[in-house]
Amino acid sequence: MYQLRGVTKQYRRGKDTVEALAGVDLTIGDGDRLVIQGPTGGGKSTLLQMLGGLDRPTAGSVELDGTDLAKLPEARLTKVRAESIGFVFQSFNLIPTLTAQENVETALVPLGLRAADRRERAAEALRSVGLGERLGHLPSEMSGGQQQRVAIARALVKNPKVLLADEPTGNLDESMRDEVMDVLEDRWKEHGLTFVMVTHDTALAKKAPRLVTIRKGRITVTENATP
């Protein structure tokens, strides 16, 4: 479970101080599915980075299962990210010179698995997102929706506790958006993940059991935001 208390994040921009998050309090339970929405520059991606341990707050605490990510030494924080948190980004972030299977395997390298085990788990992860016949294909040989499914397989292959997605359908057309969201929601249901997604897509936001709206660093939580 996540417990955020008084999370503030300030950046320096020239002589000015910009407050991306302003005293955010938020609880996210195990297995929750939550969408974060708001205007550009309102703090959405900053909040997601706090949940993923990719950035540290200026003040406040970000606890995951009772451990404050903000206070962990960098080596331990890296270990938490490697073992417990999967990330999916808008731009896919695939390595262009690696095959689909090799891209997925990169998530397992920090776990110290044998090469044969990495290959087996990566292949199974790709099969689980419908890409069993694309193991040896490069990103340039796949559609945008297929590339995003590779990114999802890479995020899930390590069996994380948390899946964080930042505009995962932002570069996709409507049909590919629906395809990718079906995969994400199926994996959430199947694995009991805590799933947090940032999106500008109002249609997707309306389907979320919980919606966090963030403006000027302050949040409003809507429960059971269903169509």
Image (cartoon, rainbow, N blue to C red):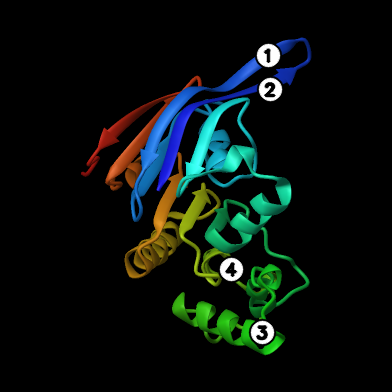
The residue shown at (64%, 17%) is 18
179 or 168, which is in the foreground?
A: 168
97 or 81, which is in the foreground?
A: 81
Q: CA distance from mark 1 to mark 4?
A: 37 Å
The residue shown at (67%, 70%) is 139
- Rendered position, 220 above or below 173: above
Residue 130, percent across and down? 46, 78
Q: Is residue 169 visible?
A: no
Count neighbours of disc 2 (C-alpha within 10 A) and say few if under 14, some if 14 to 19, many if 20 or more: few
Query: Callout 1: helix, strand or loop?
Result: strand
Task: Give the quadrant of residue 8.
Answer: top right
Q: CA distance from mark 4 to mark 3?
A: 15 Å
Q: Nearer the viewer, mark 3 or mark 2?
A: 2
Q: CA distance from mark 3 to mark 2?
A: 43 Å
Query: Callout 3: helix, strand or loop?
Result: loop
> Do the numbered discs 4 and 3 sit on residues whose CB atoms are within 8 Å?
no
- Rendered position, 193 above or below 153: above
Q: Amino acid at mark 2?
A: Tyr
Count neighbours of disc 4 (C-alpha within 10 A) and say few if under 14, some if 14 to 19, many if 20 or more: many
Q: CA distance from mark 1 to mark 3?
A: 48 Å
Query: Callout 2: helix, strand or loop?
Result: strand
Which label's residue is closer to the chain start, 4 or 3?
A: 3
Position of residue 226 in the picture relative to residue 193 (left or right): left
Disc 3: which residue: 136
Q: Amino acid at mark 3?
A: Gly
Disc 2: which residue: 11
Disc 1: which residue: 17
Residue 74, percent across and down? 72, 47
Q: Which mark is residue 154?
A: 4
**Is the C terminus in the top left, top right, bottom left or bottom right quadrant?**
top left
Count neighbours of disc 3 (C-alpha within 10 A) and say few if under 14, some if 14 to 19, many if 20 or more: some
